[in-house]
Amino acid sequence: MITDENLNNLIELAKISANDQEKASLKTDVTQILSYVSQIEMVETSEEDLLPDLINVMRLDEKPHQSSRFTNDLLNQAPDVEDGYIKVPKII
Amino acid sequence: MNFEKATIKEVTDFISEDLNNLDKVVNTSLEYAQTKDGDVHAFLGIYDDITEQIQLAKGIKTQTNSPFAGVPCAIKDNILYKGQVCSAASKMLEGYIAPYDAHVVKKLKDAGVVVVGRTNMDEFAMGSSTEYSAFGPTKNPLDLTRVPGGTSGGSAAAVAQGSVVFALGTDTAGSIRQPASFCGVVGMKGTYGSVSRSGAIALGSSLDQIGPIARSVSDTKMVFDIISGHDPMDSTCATNEYRNRHKRDNPVKTVGVPRKFLETEGVDDDVTNNFWKSIDVLKQKGYQVVDIEMPSVHLSLPVYYIILPAEVSTNLSRYDGIRYGRHIHGKNLKDTYEQSRGGFGVEARRRILVGTYVLSAGYYDAYYGKATRLRQMITKEMKDIFNKVDVIATPTTPTEAFKIGEKSDPLSMYFADLFTVPANITGVPAISVPSGFGNNKLPLGLQFMAPHFNEEYLFQIGADFENRL
């Protein structure tokens, strides 16, 4: 069971707004989902399960695409642009 | 040629008779996508470059006689097609114009395929019914009171209603196979790493795969062969050398059946009966059917609902309202973020919050860490079984297509992925082939899973099963 404080904290961290009604149903749903997935806590795992069977795939940082090839397409999607820069609200 | 039921080869043969037939085929597809789609709502948009695409397809037909030239297809709304809207069926990306082609789209274009438009889906590919689309649900073309499945519900419905010969979907827990099963068509996802994810809007990056939905196993194989292959733009896309190392030469002979898994509570009798009938068919065809034990496979679903939300909360953090997508100008930066991200629908919010929770300090080990270890355990179990059998068979879904609005709580919706999710958790390829109808005359599907990078096994036994009639 997650508390109202937990939920508000998660909403704050995830930066999604929710009104009181939405919060109430999110609390019920998230609690239900977490209680369902909690069944894995009971399962024993052995040491050999600890390491994922994965390999790193690296490439050289080379052969970039032609400069400015995508610039306009990308800037056209931004809501607020000035002199080729994306404008961000003042932070401080 | 009956376009609504035609296979890729039939369409190509028709076009080979007369190049002008290419226009006819594409126009028929466009007409159906508009007239037939009224009640179904498989499509979110028709592309506006069809005339150019027809010209290109004609050129390719003349020069290379590609078996795909002029064949109309549709793609799910989370696959980028340069210059056209791609919204992942979300308010967050409403009107977003794709700045480049997805790798798979490039492959289709090179082969002369005409991509007529984009299909409906659950928002950001979260759901099992296409009811979570921000632009209204898709209905099952075989019964308009029922869901087409999801999340690639629009793609499956478009193929089933006859407006395109095949479609692409994405599959993170069954999102290709489950709607294919609900709509009576074939759907498959390759091994994780078989098809490039470059240009697919990310949901669960360690689980997502693009794959085909088509009317026959052989069409499915043709499309898969075109879209799969190494792509340097996706570092998780396997090299050909890596694939070949996993390839098995012997033909499919043994079929494993995880009997206990099939007895999970909530699996309909209809589905079970249909499954055992299908198994009888396979036996008659000479396959050796053996019982297998998969003691951890039932954990795939809870493991998935930890790993996937974790990846979702990470992947969806990029929608900040600053660079692209929905933007609401707020009082300050934080307010701008929060208001802009208010465009996420209810299922997206649930998963973002669950993901944020399981990744947060204090819970990380108990949830995400544990789920990762269990994922290893399930994968090892799967690999061990493939040392004993060639393929594993299960029903595709625990129930037939359910009614629109029937699943009101998230967990009952999640259950729809019971049989399909193990293939994503372990990365193995899987296919759903129509296996007849249940009591309500709705289609059911038979699922096969094969060892990593042995998609050929799925096509072999899938085609053999399909030819039972």
Image (spheres, coloured by chain):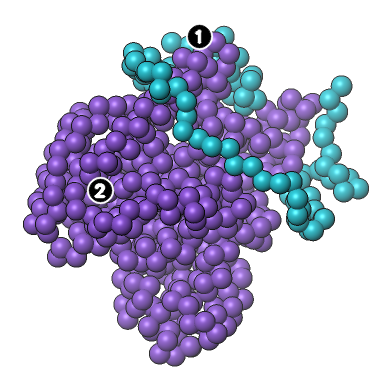
Amino acid residing under circle 1: Thr
Whether labels 1 and 2 belong to a single chain: the reply is: no
* Disc 2 target residue: B390
Residue occupying image coordinates x 71% and y 37%: B321
- Vertical relation: B71 (above or below) B254: below
* Disc 1 target residue: A3
**As rendered, which of A45 and B314 lies closer to the eye?**
A45
Q: Position of residue B141 (x, y in %)?
A: 32, 57
- Report in which chain the residue with disc 2 lies: B
Amino acid residing under circle 2: Asp
- Vertical relation: B9 (above or below) B172: below
- Report in which chain the residue with disc 1 lies: A
**As rendered, which of A8 and B427 lies closer to the eye?**
B427
**Crowding near pointer 2: few (<14 within 10 Å), some, many (20+)?**
many
In the figure, residue B161 lies in which quadrant?
bottom left
The quadrant of the image that shows the C terminus of chain B is: bottom left
Residue occupying image coordinates x 30% and y 46%: B449
Colour purple, chain: B
Q: CA distance from mark 1 to mark 2?
A: 48 Å
Q: Is residue B89 left or right of residue B289?
A: right
Choose mark 1 or mark 2, whichever is in front.
Answer: 2
The quadrant of the image that shows the N terminus of chain B is: bottom left
Task: From the image, state the color of chain A.
Answer: cyan
Q: Is residue B95 left or right of residue B401?
A: right
Q: Is residue B71 visible?
A: yes
